[in-house]
Amino acid sequence: MRLYDTARGAVVDFDAPPVVRMYVCGLTPYDATHLGHAATYITYDVLQRRLRDMGCETRCVRNITDVDDDILAAAERRGVHYLDLAFAETARFDDDMAALNTLPPASEPRATGAIPDIRGFIHEALDRGFAYCADGSVYFDTQAFDGFGALSGFGRNHMVELARQWRDNPDDPAKRDPLDFVLWQRARGGEPSWESRWGPGRPGWHVECSTLALRELGETIDLHGGGVDLLYPHHECERAQSEAVTGKPFARHWLHQALVHYQGSKMSKSLGNLVFVHELRERHEPMAIRLALMSQHYRTPWPWHDGLLDEAERRLALWRTADSSGRGNAGLLNKVRQHLDDDLDVPGALTSMDEAAQSGQPVTSAATLLGVSL
């Protein structure tokens, strides 16, 4: 299997061990599942299915960020407790993922359930000289970590601008450097907080994922995934702090999903140009939604439009008609495997299946490998 590795900037061999440990950044549950989320999790679902087909065990951890600036702000706007909001939206997300036939994660830990682990992680970063206390908060010292920025390859000015867009507050006067990021946010009025040796507060966004990944999967994981919009600052900061604390490589391979666009911009909660899975499910069967999202290569940004669903429904009908014989098709299955091993070329796999179905060949085994129920 060959996969694109963001850190190396090339398609390289992915040497899968018997147990593949994967960490995929999960959702911040303050709104419903949109198609950008779904496309991301379907990509890592297909990858897991092929790895299992190869004889590997996959252990995929997908976190839930149930305390951060976004969810606290959304809960305040709606007049609900932030954990009640997180519970409701997580339940809706899980329902959408089950409908789209994605494999359940091996573990789905919550940030609020790891506060002792997070405090221990921050304590270690301070002891090793990679963090400092200032104005009641704790910050990671990016100047103390050799190679900060190597994962994304972005220049300093671009990283500062992205940090500003993600509200990482590069203009915070308590920081030694604009690229430093918060590990422990001092307590603010009306927000949840926990006690610590540095004073009351709550964890920063990036430290939650590092702590959960290390706790659930160990010091070096095989593959780290998520949307490409998380590359900086989230994944860059996550890598730096993890390697600073452990002294070991954090992830052997970084695989990022390209963004889905809608109405001329990337689909995102901040812009409000969202297409929600639960709303599409009211008019279209889940397998058609899954196929529509699988029709685009995971590394290519692409625009969503309803014509993709029309095409997916025609494809689904073709496959079902062709598969009435119930016979196997080992040749097609091996061809689909070859496509998946070529940097997850799912669109190529779908085209091969269409050609087989058009000639009357059954496609059930190949569809099952792709997670499509006929």
Image (cartoon, rainbow, N blue to C red):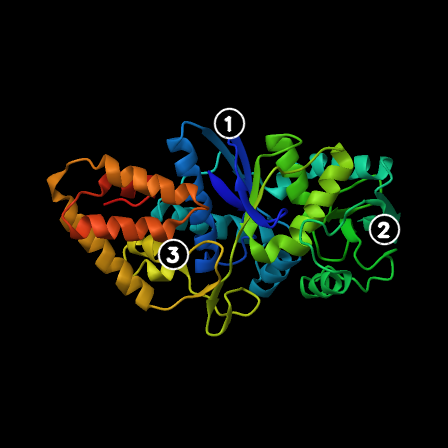
Q: Could you say whether the residue bearing mark 3 is in a helix, strand or loop?
A: helix
Q: Could you say whether the residue bearing mark 1 is in a helix, strand or loop?
A: strand
Residue drawn where x is 85% and y is 45% of the image: 144
Left or right of residue 129, residue 297 in this image = left
Q: Nearer the viewer, mark 2 or mark 1?
A: 1
Residue nearest the observer in this picture, 280 or 194 = 280
The amino acid marked with disc number 2 is Gly
Residue 19 is labelled as 1
The x and y percentages for residue 350 are 31, 51
Q: Could you say whether the residue bearing mark 2 is in a helix, strand or loop?
A: loop
The amino acid marked with disc number 1 is Val
In which quadrant will I find the C terminus? top left
Residue drawn where x is 51% and y is 60% of the image: 259
Q: CA distance from mark 2 to mark 1?
A: 42 Å
Disc 2 marks which residue? 136
Lower position in the chain sequence, tag 3 or tag 1? 1
Q: Residue furthest left?
A: 325
Q: Is residue 155 above or below residue 130?
A: below
Looking at the image, do the residues carrying marks 3 and 2 touch, with CB atoms under 8 Å apart?
A: no
Image quadrant assignment for residue 329: top left
Q: Is residue 50 above or below residue 70?
A: above
Q: CA distance from mark 3 to mark 2?
A: 45 Å
Residue 293 is labelled as 3
